[in-house]
Image (tube, rainbow, N blue to C red):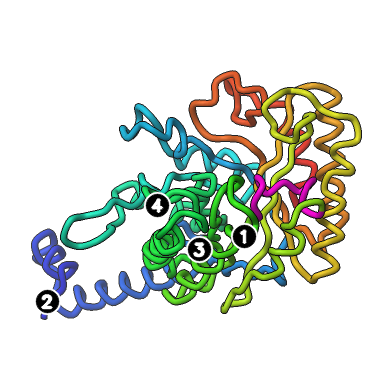
């Protein structure tokens, strides 16, 4: 059978013999294979090793948020958006190679009358970002940013049918991305209205569904009560969440931490000593139980006091890498405007918070 290359050569170069054209075709094919197999060449996606919680390297990154904006709206680019590959590349140029990308479950999964739930075109956008990240040797945390609720079933672990719907949602997503080794599954952003025991039912069901689909990538498991690091050992998270069951034995706990008086990150306040102390209880708990932790959200405003607390927090994590895998700053991504915690460049200039973060990026 004559190849497309040979037919093109015959059309453009009729004086060439069949033997010469055949040799040229072979040379082109071999050259392509060499390019395809050479690490670092942009003609292909770079192979990225999946992260294992027990051996994970130190990884500091950024939340690229906007996919969760305006939860009652449904119009892409009006109510919400997703980050661009150019935004991702800005951080990659600073050696940042892990991105937490929030999404709402109902924007990724839609029910159908005859075929059950199906993934939407929004999932295609996320997969494009995952594939671009792989070319940059970067990782993507898929963060279901629904605060402990799922579709019409309501509060996961409390409302009838909620555990099953939650597991089914992650089953669909896992089936789609199980062959993307640079994916990390972020089960849920900040469940808080259910008890830890109720939340654990949903977490274990979702983990089982992910593993049943053959997805072996790392899973990040939050606790309830906003998954605050500061309150982990004073709540029953510390007792209940040891009940996490992962058939793939590849999970870490995701906690969040801010510096203001109520630990919410909703003000520019930075309580003195917050950066050096608020992670300590979780760090010791995780070490005692042989777990690893990931700080899915942390951030601070542009003030000398806040920068000092941010540096203290990152120093604590860096000095306790037997526990801490790393974390993702809140927040980068589009549409942030003058948000005081934003790390997105403003008018082409780095935000001051970036200078602190860069000092702790390996």
Report the span colored magenta.
223-233
Q: Earlier in the sequence, mark 3 or mark 1?
A: 3
Q: Which mark is residue 221?
A: 1
Against 211, is 105 above or below? above
Mark 1 vs mark 4, foreground winner is: 4
Query: Secondary structure beneath disc 3?
Result: loop
Would you identify the image quadrant in which residue 161 lies? bottom left
Q: Earlier in the sequence, mark 2 or mark 4?
A: 2
Mark 3 vs mark 1, foreground winner is: 1
Mark 1 vs mark 2, foreground winner is: 1
Mark 2 vs mark 3, foreground winner is: 3
Q: Which residue is mark 2?
A: 2
Query: Secondary structure beneath disc 2?
Result: loop
Mark-to-mark CA distance, 1 and 2: 54 Å
Would you identify the image quadrant in which residue 236 lies? bottom right
Binning the other alpha carbons within 10 Å of mark 3 as few (below 14), some (14 to 19) or many (20 upward) gives: many
Give how far across and how far down residue 47 sits, in percent. 51, 67
User: What residue is drawn where x is 50% and y is 73%?
Assistant: 208
- Provide the major secondary structure of the magenta segment: loop
Q: Which mark is residue 153?
A: 4
Relative to residue 339, is residue 12 drawn left or right?
A: left
Q: Earlier in the sequence, mark 1 or mark 4?
A: 4
Q: Earlier in the sequence, mark 2 or mark 3?
A: 2
């Amino acid at each position: 059978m004559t190849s497309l290359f040979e037919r093109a050569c015959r059309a453009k170069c009729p004086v060439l013999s069949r033997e010469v054209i055949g040799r040229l075709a072979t040379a082109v094919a071999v050259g392509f294979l060499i390019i395809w197999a050479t690490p670092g060449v942009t003609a292909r996606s770079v192979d990225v090793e999946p992260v294992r919680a027990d051996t994970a390297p130190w990884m500091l990154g950024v939340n690229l948020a906007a996919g969760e904006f305006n939860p009652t709206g449904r119009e892409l680019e009006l109510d919400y958006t997703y980050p661009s590959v150019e935004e991702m590349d800005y951080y990659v140029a600073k050696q940042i190679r892990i991105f937490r990308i929030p999404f709402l479950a109902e924007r990724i999964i839609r029910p159908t009358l005859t075929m059950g739930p199906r993934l939407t075109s929004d999932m295609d956008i996320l997969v494009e970002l995952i594939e671009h990240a792989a070319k940059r040797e970067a990782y993507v945390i898929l963060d279901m940013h629904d605060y402990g609720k799922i579709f019409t079933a309501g509060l996961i672990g409390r409302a009838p049918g909620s555990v099953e719907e939650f597991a089914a949602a992650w089953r669909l997503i896992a089936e789609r991305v199980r062959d993307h080794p640079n994916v990390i599954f972020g089960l849920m952003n900040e469940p808080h209205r259910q008890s830890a025991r109720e939340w654990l039912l949903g977490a274990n069901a979702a983990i089982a569904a992910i593993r049943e689909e053959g997805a072996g990538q790392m899973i990040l498991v939050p606790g309830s009560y906003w998954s605050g690091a500061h309150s982990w050992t004073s709540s029953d998270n510390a007792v209940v969440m040891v009940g996490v069951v992962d058939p793939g034995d590849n999970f870490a706990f995701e906690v969040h931490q801010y510096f203001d008086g109520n630990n919410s990150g909703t003000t520019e306040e930075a309580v003195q000593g917050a950066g050096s102390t608020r992670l300590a209880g979780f760090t010791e708990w995780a070490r005692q139980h042989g777990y690893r932790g990931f700080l899915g959200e942390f951030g601070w405003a542009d003030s000398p006091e806040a920068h000092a607390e941010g540096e203290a927090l990152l120093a604590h994590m860096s000095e306790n890498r037997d526990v801490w895998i790393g974390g993702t700053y809140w927040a980068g991504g589009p549409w942030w405007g003058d948000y005081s915690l934003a790390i997105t460049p403003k008018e082409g200039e780095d935000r001051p918070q970036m200078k602190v973060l860069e000092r702790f990026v390996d």
